[in-house]
Image (cartoon, coloured by chain):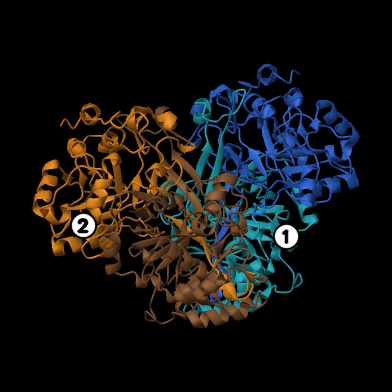
Chain colours: A cyan, B blue, C brown, D orange
Amino acid sequence: MDRADPEGAIAAAAVACSNWGRWGEDDVLGTVNYLDEAKRREAAALVRQGVSFSLSQRFEMGGPQKGWRRRTNPVHTMLDTGADAVLGHQGFPHGFGGADDVIAMPLQCSTQWDGLGHIFDHGKAWNGRAAEQVVTSDGDRVTGIEHMAAAVTGRGVLLDAGRHLGTDGELPDGFAITTEHLLAVIAAEDVVVGRGDIVLVRTGQLTRARRDGWGDYAGGAAPGLSFTTAQWLHDSEIAAIATDTWGFEVRPNEFEGAFQPLHQVAIPHIGLLIGEMWDLDALAEHCAADGVYEFLLTAAPIPVTGAVGSPVNPIAVK
Amino acid sequence: MDRADPEGAIAAAAVACSNWGRWGEDDVLGTVNYLDEAKRREAAALVRQGVSFSLSQRFEMGGPQKGWRRRTNPVHTMLDTGADAVLGHQGFPHGFGGADDVIAMPLQCSTQWDGLGHIFDHGKAWNGRAAEQVVTSDGDRVTGIEHMAAAVTGRGVLLDAGRHLGTDGELPDGFAITTEHLLAVIAAEDVVVGRGDIVLVRTGQLTRARRDGWGDYAGGAAPGLSFTTAQWLHDSEIAAIATDTWGFEVRPNEFEGAFQPLHQVAIPHIGLLIGEMWDLDALAEHCAADGVYEFLLTAAPIPVTGAVGSPVNPIAVK
Amino acid sequence: MDRADPEGAIAAAAVACSNWGRWGEDDVLGTVNYLDEAKRREAAALVRQGVSFSLSQRFEMGGPQKGWRRRTNPVHTMLDTGADAVLGHQGFPHGFGGADDVIAMPLQCSTQWDGLGHIFDHGKAWNGRAAEQVVTSDGDRVTGIEHMAAAVTGRGVLLDAGRHLGTDGELPDGFAITTEHLLAVIAAEDVVVGRGDIVLVRTGQLTRARRDGWGDYAGGAAPGLSFTTAQWLHDSEIAAIATDTWGFEVRPNEFEGAFQPLHQVAIPHIGLLIGEMWDLDALAEHCAADGVYEFLLTAAPIPVTGAVGSPVNPIAVK
Amino acid sequence: MDRADPEGAIAAAAVACSNWGRWGEDDVLGTVNYLDEAKRREAAALVRQGVSFSLSQRFEMGGPQKGWRRRTNPVHTMLDTGADAVLGHQGFPHGFGGADDVIAMPLQCSTQWDGLGHIFDHGKAWNGRAAEQVVTSDGDRVTGIEHMAAAVTGRGVLLDAGRHLGTDGELPDGFAITTEHLLAVIAAEDVVVGRGDIVLVRTGQLTRARRDGWGDYAGGAAPGLSFTTAQWLHDSEIAAIATDTWGFEVRPNEFEGAFQPLHQVAIPHIGLLIGEMWDLDALAEHCAADGVYEFLLTAAPIPVTGAVGSPVNPIAVK
């Protein structure tokens, strides 16, 4: 890997990992196509105890966003409150009172899926489409997240890289998780990862942020996937992947002067569904305790028409 | 039922159906407490085919809201687009391009859960708490929807009232679904409903709105549950209920000059989790075809801290 | 005027009325350049009584927007209230209490200025610039409304077309105000209009909407300027013009299948600052009473960086 | 002044400075009542050159807010862009293209007026009203900023405290401007301040923030008015006052453990209109150059119905 040549590395990986046309020219699902009914039956059979975990951070003003790319934390305000109800301001009959609320937020502000229209490579969106025809001010007119509304429920596998590769359960910022690392974690957990699975990679960075404060969690240095994992992401035929970090791949990026080069291959070329800012800690603790790292995972995006991303509250059931 | 006395009827039902204190004075889950691990195991075992359904409407400007109670449809705008990327406006290196988006919406604008802080009875919130202490401008400080982040996955049962009681699959506006009706549907479907289940009642109104236009879907006349079902909602010990209508209960309401009297019993007294504006049509078609009306249901609210409601994309897997 | 050929008429008017290059290639003010210090001195001298008028509608949920082009009415919510303060929720010392608020709104939702980046003709923005280089998802990077922050204070002239040309002070919807009409009103009012003036044209439509309800005020039929006034708008060298209607020009537009053709000449070619949805009624009443139709006008846009329009509360002082 | 007893000091000042009832029990204007037509005539006569200044900061994501009290910087997004127009996405006829935009912002995020409903003293709002009856989730139902829509145009006086009392034009953070200081500046400028005037106090802090970065401009240490000026603010019968700082009064506040004690007297008791975050630098430079510190000032709030504050672009004309 020539660290001075992100452009060349991206171009080579794009060719090696392309799924363009694999599911037809009208495809809007990318690797989620791998997640089929058989996989869902397999996933449901993993439920042994019935214990469920939310893998979502809280959506609130106290989140990590600092304004970069105009990403703020969610602003949640009330249209009516209990105080209004008690003070008799609401004008409802027979003692009825109510509270309503409103939110304003970037769709990428907290626990999320990146839609297929989120990232482009040299003007090309997923499946080789012209980016400017796909995502306009009206949103993603082709691959909006709403197309995945029903699809993202299947078998989840937690790869606890923080636990197996790190110190005290955490990888340091800047740690690049390679394919070898992933395979080592898979071996350590004695788990199988393959076609149609949803892979969750825990780095421990969120654990650290929870303990030490957000710092530069939103965009700063972080552990994450190495650019070199592109081939594995492609060849493993996983349906989706998510991490507990802001940006999925290692930061600083591995090339000089680069910005999220793995995204540039994974989303437009592989068609990979990527999740970010997931909270994997409670699930990880449970998995470490019973040694079972696979589960039923339902991670249904809010189907905002034309969205290039979506808040999600992923639910793992073991 | 004295149609001229909503206040008296509500007071009586509140006494008859109260769950205050049942799960301790600190409870924040209400009837969701009924949904336990055994129920989740039972639910997972219902997955036979692996087919999944999204029960969410699309979140978009084309939704039904007309501004009442300052409820608008979602306003989804882009922070960056494919057009910007192609025109070279973004300033990223090596051909990287991206799209980001923002949303502003009421949490009650489309497919949703009503949180336990959504409705009060004479200044009392769920579990007998003082409404003005629970829901302030900071949001619901006690029973915010985030407390249910992990809990709402279990066994769903579709009661297709539109199909079994209506004409061409639809109940007319103003049709009050009584307990007798519910039991008749349960019998017709040969299904069991009990403790911890999540009950989905399809009226067919959304089918009609999809065909004929929204009209007054958001707040106007609608089929829905009769006030008299309060006792069944309580006694059946279901964990949650949802409908394909704006307001869950029949409208116009059954009392003169009333407003959502069943809510006033169900939320603050029963502690019942209520879903509204769910899209049950595709699921209903499948259930009618194979005669199986039960399924694994994951309906995870987006955990907005302090929210009195939440968008949700419920996923049913059969 | 060939009603079947908007394209031809627009092209001809664009040539006849072009101000491209008049104020240099870097210009960001358009016709506001006509408004100079001498004009401001003249305007200040018009203050005789010291009576002031706000020409702004109220910004509120009760406004005329119905969702077209995702334009909603303003959603104004509270971050803190008096109720919260009294109930002791705020945590401030020594009896301090406070209220804060938030707004979400289109910049074109109510009384406004259209920025120079608001309308394009065949991909050309004001001064001949490439529209795609001027207005991106980052906003108007060249002619954002902030550039006019200090400029729009000068001599205003009210042309009360409703009063002088209409019935009971109102022009009917669809009434096209021609140059002859404008000159007739100017004559009737015995007023002078010329270089650097800000012209306010009252049609009476807002008076009607206030009486009869909004109806299709936001985008429907309306009295307004005829396309044929383009030449006068150019030749008169006025600095700006505003009306009490949603769209400034007559609607339905005068060409078949057309959409706002006068805008297409006035903004990108003349560089004219256009105001819409102004409330001219109280001012008009005063002018009719004393026969004085000129005044000091301060109409300062909120300088949102990169905005293509701005809310404004214009103040007339006589 | 006993620095350990803010409560006592506030109570004493509240009694000494109260204007409750002065303009009747229905008053919604407070000290703006002092600004009459005579004052406006006087103000208009101050226009000698016709040069105008915007005293507004830019409304943009790059502003000083950091999330405290859920105050964000403005989020400005586009509904349509020039890029969309050029790419033919908009569907308009005859080469018409357009751009529209949306904003979400706290009304207190940048250059602003504090409405009379913004601050309470022990549950009392302006004129002795019960705060919980005045400001609810519906906004300020009595003294909303819309009531001042037409009123705030009159004579402005710049008191350049930074220039006359500071070093290189700037007062240090924590500098408390006393009545003696104000009188010294008035004397140095040879200007008169009295009933109905709008007083602008420049500290130089914004100059510093512009040079050195925002730092804690939004809520941190700052020069500003001493609590002890309450009496002068009352007795001088000024209509309004504004500063170039976030919070008008000196910070840290002069009492131990206090929060904005001068606000607590000035708004609910004096009924004083207070402006914050004004940009006085260009005006100050002009005043210093010609020695004239008075001018026509038009500072019209955007009339958001029920707002407790408003963005404003104040225009000074000399």
Of residue D302 and residue B239, the one placed in the foreground of this image is: D302
Q: Residues within 10 Å of mark 2 (few under 14, many from 20)?
A: many
Please provide percent x and percent y for residue B268: 62, 26
Is residue A279 visible in this depiction of the protein? no
Please give the label number shown on residue D46. Answer: 2
Mark drawn on residue A79:
none
Q: Residues within 10 Å of mark 1 (few under 14, many from 20)?
A: many
Query: Relative to D199, is B192 on the left or the right?
Result: right
With respect to residue B304, does A197 lie above or below?
A: below
**Looking at the picture, how far across and down is residue D45, in whole percent?**
22, 56
* Residue C71 position in % (x across, y down): 57, 56
The residue located at (26%, 35%) in the rendering is D270
Tell me: A271 left or right of B200.
left
User: How many callouts does the rendering have?
Assistant: 2
The answer to whether residue B139 is above or below residue C208 is above
- Circle 1 is placed at which residue position? A196
Estimate the x, y position of residue D23 in percent, counting from the top left.
30, 32
Q: Tag 2, which chain?
A: D
C-alpha span from label 1 to label 2: 76 Å
Q: Are dots 1 and 2 on a single chain?
A: no
**In the rendered structure, the residue with mark 1 lies on which chain?**
A
Secondary structure beneath dot 2 equals: loop
Name the amino acid type tagged 2: Leu
Look at label 1 and name its amino acid.
Answer: Gly
